[in-house]
Amino acid sequence: MTSDIQITRSGQEPGAASFKIEVPPERVEAAEHKAAKAFAKRARLPGFRKGKAPLAVIKKRYHEAIREQVLHEVIGESWKATIAQEDLKPIADPRVHDVKFERGAPLTFQFHVELKPELTLERLGGFTVVRAVPSVTDEMVEAQLDDLRRQRATWVPIEDRSPKPGELVRGSVATIESGTPGESKDFQITLGEGQAIPDIEEKLMTLAPGDTVDTTVRFPDDFPEETKRGRSRDVRIVLHEAKFQDLPALDDGFAREVGDFETLIDLRKTVREDLELEARREADGGVRRQLLEQIVAANNVPAPRPLVERFLQAYDKAYDVPADRGEAFRTEVRPIAEAQVRRDLIMEQIATQEGLHATEEELDEHIAEIAKRRSEQPGEIYTRLQKANRLREIEHGITENKVFDFLLQQSTVTES
């Protein structure tokens, strides 16, 4: 029974709530007795046969473990009771804090819960959005072909000149203190890609392989390490090796090497078709963004702080942001997180109220299509996706497509 657990709402904000929980001593003692009996059945203590040690001895010997099990059980029961009593729709397990656990007194603690906020969408249609498909130019096709050539290029050593942007260099740098260079650090970078501070890259482009130079470099004002910003340092730079890319000829032979193409004309045609397909996808993405922005504006969709903070924490982890840049990074990406929260709330609300969530039949059909394209059995595809935890991702994609199909039927899309 959970009726003896006292649950009091102690705080609330959009997307979150706090609850004070009080569990009477009798319930805690019952949980403790239950845990002690469980330990007694499997405990082996000197002087006692297995399972025959007195509970008083068991409670003293396994005090901390029993306490931990009691907390786990009672907090779990309290969480279920809180969900039922308050009719909650949590989006994650609660955070538990302010635990007070003393013998003979009620067990008290706080739940802080992130909740799916209630959302009312009064207007979902009557909007006008523009689908702008960018043109694919000859220059774009040639740039893509150049990327393919660079992917298959060989690196050739440079011997009689200085390296240029786009070329690979291997060297070392050491800080000079009181005229003496310290321990050198090796590096390998592609010039012109911002992999080293500008002063070092500029100096490398004046050296030939095997050269050494002592110079002064200045760290940029936006350097990641705040303590080095704007500071100058004497260094010794050694250029050990430099290489340039020997690009393959752009001809029919290259086309056959890239894939199932007879001629360069065939390859160029496919590259253009791929770029045009990507342009259409970008245009469709633009339509979806515009539509969601107008729905947000028309319905005043909130971005609850707790849900935004959850996204910010995920971004921190994904980008491995240094501690000294954490606050600035979160400030910079907060608008992105807020937009994502609003987007997710809208999509979930519409999918729920219109019954547009992906069905098992639709998931099976999608997997069957993948299997057909790859000439594999659907069961093999399903098992692989399940092992990779990607089934939910596919279901989410199917649901999103259904939601946008529903929304676009109620608005006007103009082409440009």
Image: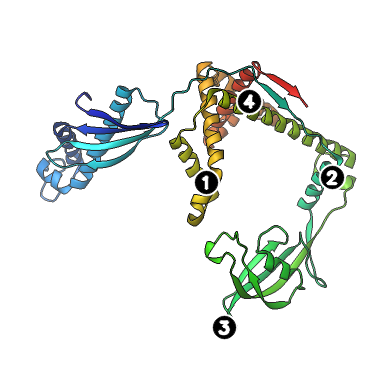
Say left or right for 24 vs 362: left
Tell me the amino acid under the disc marked 1: Thr
Of mark 1 and mark 3, the one earlier in the sequence is: 3
**Residue nearer the viewer, 357 or 351:** 351
Up-down: is 241 above or below 98? below
Say left or right for 103 vs 111: left
Of mark 3 and mark 4, the one earlier in the sequence is: 3
Q: Residue at the spot x=76%, y=72% of the render? A: 206
In terms of secondary structure, where does tag 2 sit? helix
Whether residue 54 is visible here, answered yes or no, is no
Say left or right for 411 vs 339: right
In terms of secondary structure, where does tag 4 sit? helix
Q: Residues within 10 Å of mark 2 (few under 14, many from 20)?
A: some
Which x, y percent locates residue 360?
54, 20
Q: Residue at the spot x=55%, y=30% of the render? A: 343
Q: Which mark is residue 331?
A: 1
Q: Which quadrant is the C terminus positioned in?
A: top right
Residue 81 falls in image quadrant: top left
Tell me the amino acid under the disc marked 2: Glu
Of mark 2 and mark 4, the one earlier in the sequence is: 2
* Residues at marks 1 and 4, CA–CA distance in whole angstroms: 26 Å
Q: Which quadrant is the N terminus positioned in?
A: top left
Q: Which residue is mark 2?
A: 142
Q: Which mark is residue 291?
A: 4
* Residues at marks 1 and 3, CA–CA distance in whole angstroms: 41 Å
Whether residue 309 is visible here, answered yes or no, is yes
* Residues at marks 3 and 2, CA–CA distance in whole angstroms: 52 Å
Nearest to the eye among marks 3 and 2: give it: 3
Up-down: is 163 above or below 64? below
Of mark 1 and mark 4, the one earlier in the sequence is: 4
